[in-house]
Structures are given as structure tokens and as C-alpha cells.
Amino acid sequence: MPELPEVNTKKLNFDRVALNRKIEKVELRETNHIFKNISGEAFAQKMKGRQFTGSYRRGKYLFAHLDNGHDVLFHFGMTGEFYAYDEPEQRPRHERFAFLFPDGERLGFDCPRKLAHIYYLEDKDAFIKEKKLGEDALVISEEAFLEKLNGKTGTIKGFFLNQSNLAGMGNLYADEVCWQVGIHPASLIPALDDKTRRLLHHRMQAILQTAVNRRADYANYPDEWLWNHREKGGTCPRDGQELEKDKVAGRSTYYCPQCQELKE
DNA sequence: TGTGATGTTGAATG
DNA sequence: GCATTCAACATCAC
């Protein structure tokens, strides 16, 4: 689930449930590997009595601002998810911890694969700098995008996946952008002309904005996108060719062998 | 039963 | 420093 549009939807849910409510306590379940720079117990201690006052999404990261000036950082990995519920028996199966509010409602953080990361940050800007996290893909200017591409020698897909270039693109949206622009995901950046580079930026933001507007609800993505055809035996919505599957930049990649040109 | 899955990181390699 | 590949993290679905 969690690329930029999916995380944006999680932010909406988080804001609706958690903002400006006193946190009675944090309930800890099995949290191995989840908390990165703090123990679960210390995290629970710090949360007690606090409130979230706002949140900020950058790429796939969600920074939740606390009333003491610090931030809780959520990264959802592959399977992280918020669930809000009122009754204990509604607790999701792989809940790692939950915020309990005074009226008894809970916001649980569920993560079967434990690939999520939670940080407690006293200085979120220092964290962003340290991680070299790029600008958010939805708002990065064309100029900054071109500047990031400048001098790179790898594949365009690898560029999209590296969060220090820009933040928020993941495997599925990267395939979608390449398909819509009509270039093979393994195309090498030096071989891309200026027009193609600008088109990549434009299509990327159009796709992400549409996905955000549709709340990352895949069933409502346009059928003329690659998205809902991106599977074994799927065919290209443009020309009906059977899609091919390969590994590019170490990740499963779908593309149309007929209408996506490999530039190298 | 084995394989791969929307992510990140670190190690090893070129 | 850059880019790539691999393994690890742990569980589920096909």
C-alpha cells in the first residue's frame, strides 16, 4: 500500500482520529524492530498525556507533531496501517501498539511484516537532512527535478526509487510513469532528451495527484492506466500487447515491449 | 511447498 | 562518490 498517495490517505485518517485529543496511554504489543531510536516503553512514557497538533507528510514519511514540539515519525514499510476502533475485540491481528484516547477509542498501528519504522524525533529537520530525504514528489518543481536528473548515470526507474532524489515514488507508481511516458523503465538517464525529462516530471505529478484525489483507491484508478493491468498475463491498455515482467533496479517491473522504448 | 510482495538499509562489488 | 545486487526484516496469499 504505501507509496505517496497511500501514505497521504493514511494521513487523512490519522488527522481525523488523532489530532487534538489527549493520549491517555499507549498500549504496546509485540514491537520488535518497529521502534528505531527509542524503546517501546520509553515511547509509551513520552506519549502519555500528550496531544498531536498537526501532521506533515513528506514522501512516504508521516511526521506527527506533538504539543511538546517534538514529532513522532511513521514509516509504513510494506504493511503498516492505522486502524481506529472502539472495542478491544476489534483490535487488528498484527497490531504493534495503539494510542488510547479518553473516550475509549483507539488508533492502532498494525504491521504484519514489521517492516514499518517508528521514530521519536526532537528535531525533524535534522532527521530529514541526515536521511538526505529528497523533496516531496508531488510538489517538486520541474526545475528541481531536472537538476536532480542532471549527471545521473543509472536507470530512470532506479532514479525514481531512490528517496534522496525525490520522496514518495515507489515501485508501482514508477512503472506507471514510465508506461505513460512511453519509455522502458531500464532506460538510462543520459539517453533521455530534455522533452522526455519534462514529460516524466509532468506525468509523475499528474498521476500522483489523481491517485491522491482518489484516496489511493485502486478500483477507481482509470482503466486506461497501466495500474490495473499490471499483472501476469495483463495486456497494454494502449496497444493490447501482452506485458512483460523483468527485474529493474532490483524490483519487479512491468512494461509493454511494444510501446515503451528502451533508451540507452 | 515454494515464491514473491507497494519498502528501507547495509554490505559487498564494480 | 555512484550505481547495482543481494540479503535481511516477518507474514501472508497464490
Image (tube, coloured by chain):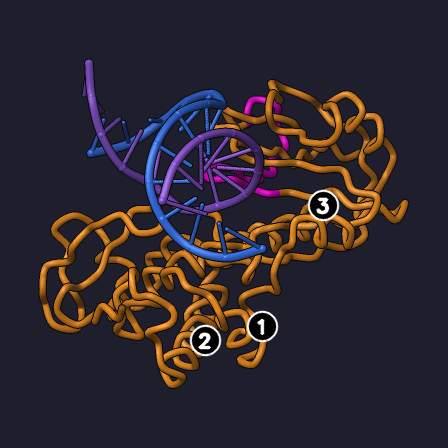
Chain colours: A orange, B purple, C blue
> Is A152 covered by the magenta stretch?
no
Q: State which quadrant residue A216 falls in.
A: bottom left
Q: Residue at x 17, y 64 (%)?
A: A256
For marks 3 and 1, give the one nearer the viewer. Answer: 1
What is the CA distance from the residue labelled 1 to the residue labelled 2?
9 Å
| Three-letter code for the amino acid on which mark 1 is drawn | Ile
Of A106 and C3, nearer the camera is: C3
Q: Earlier in the sequence, mark 1 or mark 2?
A: 1
The residue beneath circle 2 is: A201
Q: What is the magenta range?
A: A75-91
Q: Looking at the rendered structure, which numbered label has been put on residue A140?
A: 1
Image marks 1 and 2: residues in contact by CB distance under 8 Å: yes
Q: Is residue C8 above or below residue A170?
A: above
**SS for tag 3?**
helix
The image position of residue A235, as x and y in percent, is 13, 60
Q: Earlier in the sequence, mark 3 or mark 1?
A: 3
Name the residue furthest right: A68
The residue beneath circle 3 is: A18
Dot 1, crowdedness within 10 Å: few (<14), some or many (≥20)? Answer: some
| Three-letter code for the amino acid on which mark 3 is drawn | Ala
